Image (cartoon, rainbow, N blue to C red):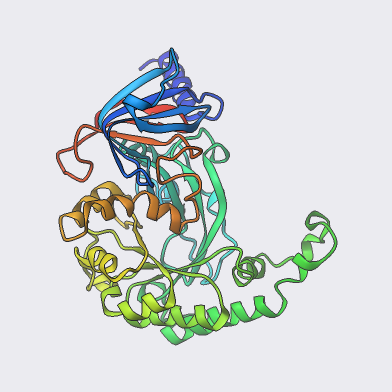
Amino acid sequence: MNTVGKLIAGAFTAALLSTSAMAQDIAVRGAQVWTMGPQGVIENGVVVIEDGNITAVGPVASTAIPEGMRVMEASVVTPGLVDAHSTVGLTGYLNQPDDQDQLDNSAPVQPHLRAIDAYNPHDRLVQWLRELGITTVHTGHGPGALVSGQTMVVKTVGNTVDAALVEDGTMVVANLGSWALDRESAPGTRAKQIAMLRQALLRAQQGGESAEDDDEDEDAVDSASRDLVNEAFASVVRGERPLLVTANRAQDIMSALRLADEFGIEVIIDGAADAHMLLDELRESGVSVILHPTMARNSGEMENASFTTAATLAEAGIPFALQSGYEAYVPKSRVVLWEAGFAAGHGLAPEDALASVTIDAARIIGMDERVGSLEVGKDGDIAMFNGDPLEYVTHVTGVVIDGYVVSEATR
């Protein structure tokens, strides 16, 4: 492609990604509309989107489509899919040092590292997920350190991270187990991991509120007096954000539950390969689980991961969602649609499988008032399919985000 062609292509891509000012009025009809909300599945239904938000959902026969509105059609229409935990945008598809920003290993505890400062909305993997119906992603720093940073929620569009951003600083990410140990330094053991976390939470509990309680405006506080690490932990202690704890071994899951009880903080268990061993404990604790990808490799910390764990959690009444997670190898990101389909093939009811990557995922990451189901007032995010979304042979045929058609490719 010549220089002019590249400039034109670049301008088109930028226009596609900058959806905030280009929301369309559009109606999407489906032979089936899986709302994932109170209306359930609507046969021969339609979703109407105006100014980026859903304004009507119902049967075609009784739902008015404004005159002149563009109408798209699909066999099955669902909410835009929600990935409950990913590192996409920080782990680039090239798998080279210059595009791998999910982990800084210069210190074991770095809760002040913000995903917004590392996210690349132009990475090819973001486009790949978008074309496969994933419209909302909870992404951020990955495993490898005791506390690796913060997460955020983004839409899979946006020419800049600010345009993509839904929420910054959603959770603080902690990691327990062997992959967050440093045998030559600290933490060198599991006991040291918990001791370091406890010390940080105690420090925040005892003095982390000082800057927040000061009558001065935060901008007026002397920057030299601020401790960003302590501020991040203080926000967890105050209940402003959860502590997302990646823990796969039963002993590590129990350590996380003890911390939650000791400090009265919200903990979300991530990974949870041994969850089937602790059903009573998880249920009684009231925690939510962001389960490992269904097809994750069963080795090391995840040797007890199973295709059937999602079904086991559903049967036990433990709230959970599926995730793409972190992949140390190419292509660097899984696709939650396929993970849900595989879980459905191994005992998880189809409606629960789709919920695990729509409304249940949205609820766990605190976004269910905006995304995850097709209801009036929610964001105009839609995925379209030419068949059952959970069948391997089905393709995504269109994607809408905030009322803008971002893909009409068959994927």
The x and y percentages for residue 349 are 21, 56
Horizontal side, residue 114 vs residue 391: left or right: right
For the point 44% across and 25% down, the residue is 13
The outermost residue toward the front is 62
The x and y percentages for residue 390 are 21, 46
Q: Quadrant of the C terminus?
A: top left
From this view, report whether residue 9 is shown above or below residue 385: above
Number of numbered discs present?
0
The x and y percentages for residue 233 are 61, 70
Horizontal side, residue 122 vs residue 276: left or right: right
From this view, report whether residue 172 is shown above or below residue 126: below
For the point 21% across and 50% down, the residue is 341
Horizontal side, residue 329 vs residue 150: left or right: left
Residue toward you, 199 or 21: 21
Residue 85 visible in this rendered orientation of the protein: no
The x and y percentages for residue 78 are 32, 39
Q: Quadrant of the N terminus?
A: top left
For the point 26% across and 28% down, the residue is 74
For the point 45% across and 87% down, the residue is 191
Residue 55 visible in this rendered orientation of the protein: yes
The outermost residue toward the bottom is 191
